[in-house]
């Protein structure tokens, strides 16, 4: 839906993910959205270079989040929010609903 605006479907999904979960790292985003790791990494790096995302190192992992200092932050989050609300409830529930408690160890996905 917003892929024409953001450039491609992967970027749209990554932005929806970061807006919903506040932060994330490439492997986690890949696993949640069932996307190729390289595609996620390319989009994260592209958005970081453009100033849309900020990142910090947590142990050995780079964690990304929407950059609140981005000049169009409020407008971008409004667009993302409207895009999320237009998704079907099944898609929102499957990919963009934060877990409220941790998963039991050994429980299959």
Image: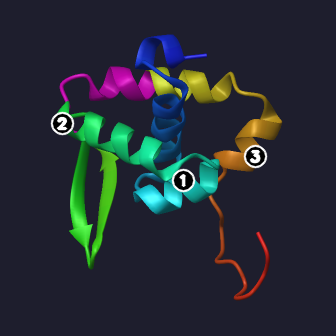
Is residue 92 at all visible to an observer of this figure?
A: yes
What residue did someone put label 3 on?
93
Q: Position of residue 98 (x, y in %)?
A: 62, 57
Mark 3: few/some/many CA within 10 Å (<14, 14-19, 20+):
few
Q: Front-most of 80 and 63?
A: 63
Residue at position x 27%, y 79% from top? Answer: 59
Distance from Cα at disc 3 to Cα at disc 2: 31 Å
Vertical order, 90 against 54 (above or below): above
What residue did someone put label 1 on?
30
Q: Position of residue 4 (x, y in %)?
A: 49, 11
Is residue 107 rendered magenta in the image? Answer: no
The colour scheme used to paint the residues is rainbow
Precedes in sequence: disc 3 or disc 2: 2
Residue at position x 54%, y 47% from top? Answer: 36
Image: magenta residue range: 67-78
What residue did someone put label 2 on?
49
Q: Position of residue 11 (x, y in %)?
A: 45, 31
Q: Is residue 50 left or right of residue 27?
A: left
Q: Quarter-wise, where is residue 78 in the image?
A: top left
Residue mark closest to the camera, 3 vs 1: 1
Disc 1 is placed on an element classified as helix
Return the mark for residue 62: none
Q: Quarter-wise, where is residue 13 in the image?
A: top right
């Amino acid at each position: 839906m917003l892929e024409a605006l953001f450039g491609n479907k992967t970027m749209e999904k990554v932005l929806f993910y970061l807006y919903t979960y506040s932060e994330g790292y490439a492997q986690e985003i890949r696993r949640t959205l069932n996307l190729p790791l390289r595609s996620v990494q390319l989009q994260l790096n592209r958005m970081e270079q453009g100033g849309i995302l900020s990142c910090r190192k947590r142990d050995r992992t780079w964690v990304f989040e929407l950059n609140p200092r981005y000049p169009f932050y409020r407008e971008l989050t409004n667009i993302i929010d409207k895009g999320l609300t237009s998704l079907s409830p099944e898609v929102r529930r499957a990919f963009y609903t934060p877990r409220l408690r941790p998963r039991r160890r050994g429980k299959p996905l």
